[in-house]
Image: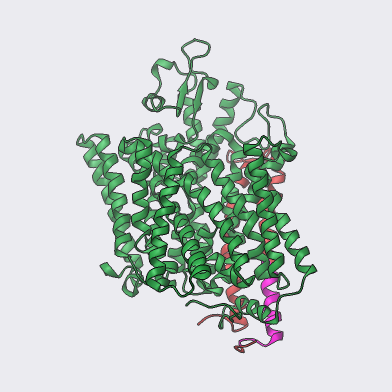
Amino acid sequence: MAYQIGRGDFIANLGKIYGIYTVGFIGFTAGLAVLEQMGVPNRIIGYLYIFMTIGIYALIGVLSRTSEVSEYYVAGRRVPAFYNGMATGADWMSAASFISMAGGLYLQGYDGLAYVLGWTGGYVLVAILLAPYLRKFGQFTVPDFLGTRFGGHFARFIGILVLLCASFTYVVAQVFGVGIITSRFLGMSFELAVFVGLAGILVCSMLGGMRAVTWTQVAQYIILIVAYLIPVVWLSAQKTGVPVPELMYGQALTKITELEKTFGVLKGHATAFADPNGQFSWVRFYNYFFLIFCLMVGTASLPHILMRYFTTPNVRDARASVAWSIFFIFLLYFTAPAYAAFAKWEIYSSVIGQPIASLPAWVQNWSQVAGMLTIRDANGDGILQLAELVINQDIIVLATPEIAGLPYVISGLVAAGGLAAALSTADGLLLAISNALSHDVYYKMIDPKASTGRRLMVSRVLLLVVAVIAAYTASTRPSGIIQMVAWAFSIAAAGLFAPLVLGIWWKRANSIGACCGMIAGFGICLFYLIGTRYFDMPLWWGISNVSCGIFGIPLAFVVTYVVSMMTAPPSKEMQDFIDSIRVPRGAVLTVSGQTRVE
Amino acid sequence: MPDSVLTPEKAHAYWQRTSKLMWTILGLWFLASFVVHFFATALNTIVIFGFPFGFYMAAQGSLVVFVVLCAWNAIAQNKIDEEFGVAED
């Protein structure tokens, strides 16, 4: 089986293989816990976690190396729905979801839930509008679909531009997250850590492409979900006596509300759409919904997610796979609000109002990490007031094991989980970028006669080049990582959602209409984003630029509609092609001038 | 149709059923994603097991709806496929 990852025997025994892997990982954690009790220093435990997990991913990557095109691009289309769901979960949940989201909920309360809703509901759109039809179409990449449906290189080319713009913005944020975790747990400089993390990303994806990334992502999902749930389950058991945080954090919310009253907090944790004085604000109201809308539509437009549904054996499995994906993602998102509430309860009840000289050890530890936790005794009374504690949103999840008084081995576990989340997303994104360049630009547009070996070589070289550029960009510490991730969603949504949806659901959409729609949507989104971010352009109606897609998405639909109606309808041949991708059974028709890959 | 999977009439009926399912789920998605949360402030006055209801819907209620919608779509569309004899072997 060893050299046959992704093949017959391997697929037949998936349950057994990943079962043994999960038990092995838990055993490894238990072993480290024993070592910790025997007095092995924390630093060594951190090292063991990072190198063991990256070692496993590298091993899977090497074992699934391939020189076959369909293995490299779509994992041989043999990934069962259940496992593709897990892989999509890991592909989807990045450093932002794992490390920052619960912290955002801690700081923003109700308003932070826009991320929880926005990063889950989009799968409904993927399921009903896109995934089954893209699977039936059955090529390798999302630009392949645009190129075929909207006949020609121009539509493909704009699609590639949007893909590159969105995915690159996103991948820089992930490499940045990998750098933070690696630097903290290996104790090396951030700039160096970024490149060490990069090596971890590349060993997974360089040799085996989609096949390697798929089976690594399944392994990464298991680690990240275990790492996310254990500390909060423990905390819930400790505080409420019941180890089901999702049901029990109502108690935490009640306590938080009581404590907020005694602290004189005007805007409560659960108060919706309120300004800092607790008053209802229309601007916050519509920004909340615009952000949800952009994140959801962005989910249904990001090529690294959509391409996962090219890997299932058939259309039926593609649909089932979307359902499994959202289920596996749901397990983490459903828990994040509980994470935030328990952490807030603990901090409000046993940190605030205490003498600064006798705060818990974790507060002392984290205040030594620059910019993460600051205590300033403004009124000089020696007692910590709420306003005197400034806490960074990125430490809530990482510090929860210490807040709950758990052994250091759990902190290491959480770091390994965060690393798995960031690495798996970075792998998927880099692969989407290098596939677009090697398959769509090089093979389809520059040299259609290129041999298989040459295409894969070009893909690998490009993967390396893009990864190094991303790592370099991340090492310059661009500001606002979470913002960058939200921008990536808006860009993808504005440029790709309308042509994908109309391409399948509206036969009358033609090439020129779709191209104009993409340019208009993508253009206004970039204009607003760059104008407000870099050129002091005032916000339109106070709409935050993370929701810049709110202008681009509807505009792309309107322009595509108007221009299509003003020009000639697509050929009969094209309409038959659309009919053929709408029905699961039967062959996909070819459109003249297009070649199909199998 | 080229591969005689469906006659044009059947293909039309199949696509109508599929579209109807799509619009139904899209409508429920819109309710769960947006409409419920328009009333968050009012719903927050109802507290169940310590959870203000408006907060609960955004943190968990709508998420459950999304999971159910995706599962329902997979099952219902399979039924339609089988009924029209276009399911894969």
Q: Position of residue A301 (x, y in %)?
A: 59, 58
Q: Position of residue A152 (x, y in %)?
A: 61, 71
Chain letter, red: B
In magenta stretch: residue B14: yes
Residue extending furthest toward the front = A446
Residue at x-position 49% and y-position 73%? A448
From the image, which quarter does the N terminus of chain A lie in? bottom left
Residue A201 drawn above or below residue A154: above
Image side of residue A532 versus residue A411, left or right:
right
- Corner quadrant of residue A287: top right
Q: Position of residue A588 (x, y in %)?
A: 57, 80
Image side of residue A21 versus residue A450, left or right:
left
Q: Position of residue A557 (x, y in %)?
A: 72, 60
In magenta stretch: residue A308: no
Q: Nearer the viewer, residue A325 or A546?
A: A546
Residue extending furthest toward the right = A566
Residue extending furthest toward the left = A38
Range drawn in magenta? B5-22
Q: How is the image coloured?
A: by chain
Residue at x-position 46% and y-position 23%? A374
Q: Nearer the viewer, residue B15 or A437?
A: A437
**Residue A309 in view (yes/no):** no
Image side of residue A565 versus residue A457, left or right:
right
Residue at x-position 37% and y-position 71%? A453
State the predominant SS element of the stretch in magenta: helix
Residue A306 drawn above or below residue A414: below
Image side of residue A473 versus residue A61, left or right:
right
Residue extending furthest toward the top = A380
**Residue A91 in view (yes/no):** yes
Chain letter, green: A
